[in-house]
Image (cartoon, rainbow, N blue to C red):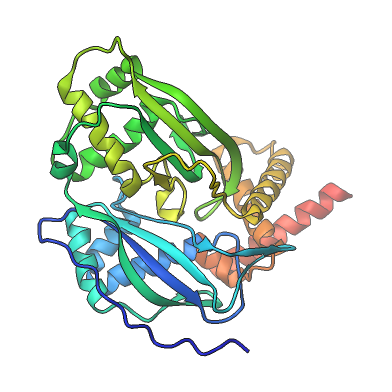
Amino acid sequence: MPRVIAKPKRKTPIWSKKTEIVSLAFDLIASKDAILYPQYTTGLHAWFLDQVRSIDPDLSAYLHDGQSEKAFTISNLEGNLIVSGQHLHAIANQSYRWYVTGLSKELVQCLEIWLKQLPSTIALRHCPLVIQNCELALPATTYRELYNAELINQTIKLSFVTPTSFRRRSHHFPLPVPSTVFQSYLRRWNNFSGMEFDSTEFSDWVENNVTINRHRIASEKVAAGKRGMVTGFTGMVEFGLSSKREPNPEFEKLYYALYRLAPYCGTGHKTTFGLGQTRACWIEEETIEAPSLQTILAQRIEELTEKFRIQRKRTGGERADLIAEKWATILARRELGESIIAIAEDLEIPYETAKSYLKLARRAINVGAG
């Protein structure tokens, strides 16, 4: 039997009224042994938006549906999650760490109210996590403070501790090309800072003047978000400025400011589902990878999607591809033991639709086997 977890005495992080960016670290304890589904970050994502909704429904709706850059990120759970067979296990009384960042003044003000009435538990499907403590993971700051900080004038090091990828022409691009990396940061900067820079001009400057001095990266395909797979990279990269660079003090200042922003905003896409977690250092001995179960799920979804696409090739078109991927996602997640109700909720489709798609997917597999 797990021991009774004492109610923690938490201190509420505080910051000044001018703050625009915060990074929060939550210390959590699993109250019992529990099975986590591979895409459990979708549950953390939904729980966080529900918390925002309780304070500011309009802001929560915008964070969920808005087409601009998202003003928050969340991480995976850091800690001892055990992969056993087709399941991911949280261990009773084990400590886990979870990160949440706010990237706009509006959201930061909402987080300040939220932390004063923080619930005792994160209700993550079948795995309640008791919130023991919350603290600032990084100093609370503003975009102007990041911009006006003293220039580093040396190489900069970034570690990508969860799979990181970029969207390029409807495909995943899993390489830390300097212009792509820093454009990822600039999009957030231009969205939230009120200090906008020309994206094309800065990208050209980075491409001509920023180099990769060394790297140690590996690629990985994982299931992420509500459906489908992401091919990403993890590891470390050291960037430098060319000794023959074009003199541009404004862009050099921005370059270092974006480096300081990176650990707050994360890198690439799907940062609101745990991808692209970034540290402003070279993590020599520590390699943080997504649980292998996510990789297994991604491989199975990819395998099934290809089978369904081949079977549906006569119909063709983008819609057929989307249906094939949705069938594959539902069947693969069901094979790993997730309930149809839970899958339907994550995919935001009616239960009966998910159930129907599952039947059609199983029928297609049986036809293929025959």
State the residue in front, 250 or 80. Answer: 80
Residue 136 left/right relative to 161: left
Describe residue 55's horizontal placement relative to residue 369 as left or right.
left
Observer-nearest of 243 and 330: 243
Q: What is the x, y in percent for residue 333? A: 65, 60
Judge whether residue 348 can be spotted in this image: no
Q: Relative to 169, is 262 on the left or the right? A: left
Image point 33% across, 42% down: which residue? 262
Specify the quadrant of the image occupied by residue 151: top left
Residue 304 position within the rendered picture, expressed as x and y whole percent measured from the top left: 71, 47
The quarter in which the N terminus is drawn is bottom right
Q: Residue furthest right?
A: 370
Residue 2 visible in the picture: yes
Residue situated in front as seen by the camera: 204 or 61:
204
Residue occupying image coordinates x 19% and y 41%: 146
User: Image quarter for residue 32?
Assistant: bottom right
Q: Residue furthest left?
A: 17
- Residue 132 lies, with reference to residue 67, above or below; the image says below
Instruction: State the residue at coordinates (44%, 45%).
Output: 276
- Residue 218 position in % (x across, y down): 59, 36
Residue drawn 68% across and 58% down? 331
Q: Is residue 191 above or below residue 112?
A: above
x then y, percent, for residue 196: 16, 34
> Above or below — where is 303 with respect to 55?
above
Q: What is the count of numbered marks?
A: 0
Question: Is the residue 35 above or below the residue 323 in the image?
Answer: below
